[in-house]
Amino acid sequence: MAGKNKRNILSETGPEVSVNMLGTFQLTVGEACVKDDASRSPRIWNLLAYIVMHRDKNIPQEEFIDLLWPEEDIANPANALKTLLYRARATLMPSFGPDLNLILSQRGSYSWNSALPCKVDAEVFADMVQQACQTKLPVERRMELYQEAVSLYKGNFLPKLADQLWVIPLSTYYHGLYVQAVLAYSNLLKEAEKYEEMADVCTNAVSIEAFDERLHGLLITALMRQGKNVAALNHYEKATELLYRNLGVRPSAELRALYQEIMKEQQSLEMDLGVIQEDLRETVARSGAFVCEYGFFREAYRLEVRRAVRQGSCVHIALLTVSLPDGKIPPLDLLNMTMDQLLTVLKDNLRRGDVISRYSGSQYVLLLPTANYEDGTMVMERIIRAFYQQHRKNFLKINYKLQQLGLNDYM
């Protein structure tokens, strides 16, 4: 940094230090800024972050030693701590100059220089969320506070120090507070019919917290309310695949209800029968069994049941489950690979009139119309045999259950 800027900083008494800890770690004084990529030593940034977050007290050197070298046997830990503090000050000095002393030492302890005001983005964020939660405030004011708060949250608390024991509970707290704020803010935007802003907030939120189904549901709702049904459907499929692959869970009833709503709204009026026929022709041209989302599978199931009642034919439903040899759920990476392989085998070995849907992270459900029980059993055995012929090294177990729909299913 230029010498002129340093003099501007030092000419002020007690300059405010602005600290960012959400998404990244950096300290800013005036126009000077130091980021956590300025030094390769994570211990330096661990030390600085700990001092900032405990700036209201003197920290004994023993506490620092336990923090920085928890399982290491160091010959002279006090000396190692002094060396690390020297390196920390050397990291800050090129930007802040030699006279801005952020860390004070006294009688075997260290502390933040209380003469320097310090503003931490994580603390400002938490305070704004707490204010916005107050239902007695006007709705517009609450939305303003939520908007400022969620815009402050650039990512998780001290992500480069995420493995530090003292960071973990704070990271969990701020992350949970962020999700809470987005949910509350999005519902206020929904009530105010500000769907575009709601979609922006939720899009950013799912990039930070990808596995919260509520956030995906709100984003899908915001897209639908803007008439962006194709985008809503695409995000639904992306979200369900994400949940299957990373958590091994199927979509909730609430998320599946949104899918049904999307499909209903997709059925717009079309007066040109030729256009409809062309669209249907493209669908029919696809080879192999029909693969669909579980919400659509339920509708296909109801249709086949009605046809079976009318024609007196029988319909079978099958459930394929992938597990470890002991019956437990496999690790997700192995499970996802196997489920992809199994789906290919299913499509190649089932008829075009058969229907496949993923029921859970480790299960496929099949609809087999016009097949008797013996035929259905032969089909299931053929599928499992074909799978192991193609994937001989796969040790996972595939079980199936086959059942004919009874009279009660037709009622």
Image (cartoon, rainbow, N blue to C red):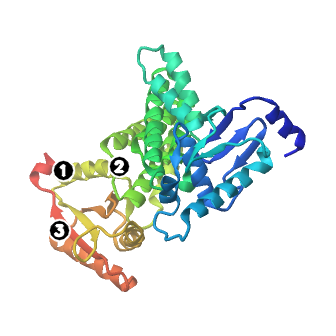
Disc on res. 251: 2
Residue at 46% across / 45% down in the picture? 170
Callout 3 environment at 10 Å: few (<14), some (14 to 19), or many (20+)? some
Q: Which mark is residue 346?
A: none
Side of 220 relative to 105 (left or right): left
> Label 3: which residue?
372
Q: Secondary structure at mark 3?
A: loop
Q: Nearer the viewer, mark 1 or mark 3?
A: 3
Q: Nearer the viewer, mark 1 or mark 2?
A: 2
Return the disc, 3 or 2, that comes first in the chain's sequence: 2
Q: Residue furthest front?
A: 107
| Residue count near mark 1 (Cα–Cα under 10 Å), binned few <14, some 14–19, many ≥20 | few
Res 200 visible: no
Find disc 1 in the rendering and name its residue. Answer: 310
Residue 97 locus on image (x, y percent): 80, 45
Q: Position of residue 366 (x, y in %)?
A: 28, 62
Within 10 Å of disc 2 (Cα), the crowding (few <14, some 14-19, many 20+) is many
Asked where in the image residue 161 lies, by quadrant, the reply is bottom right
Gap in angstroms between the C-alphas marked 1 and 3: 17 Å
The secondary structure type at the circle numbered 2 is: loop
Which amino acid lies under the numbered mark 3 shown in the image of this protein? Asn
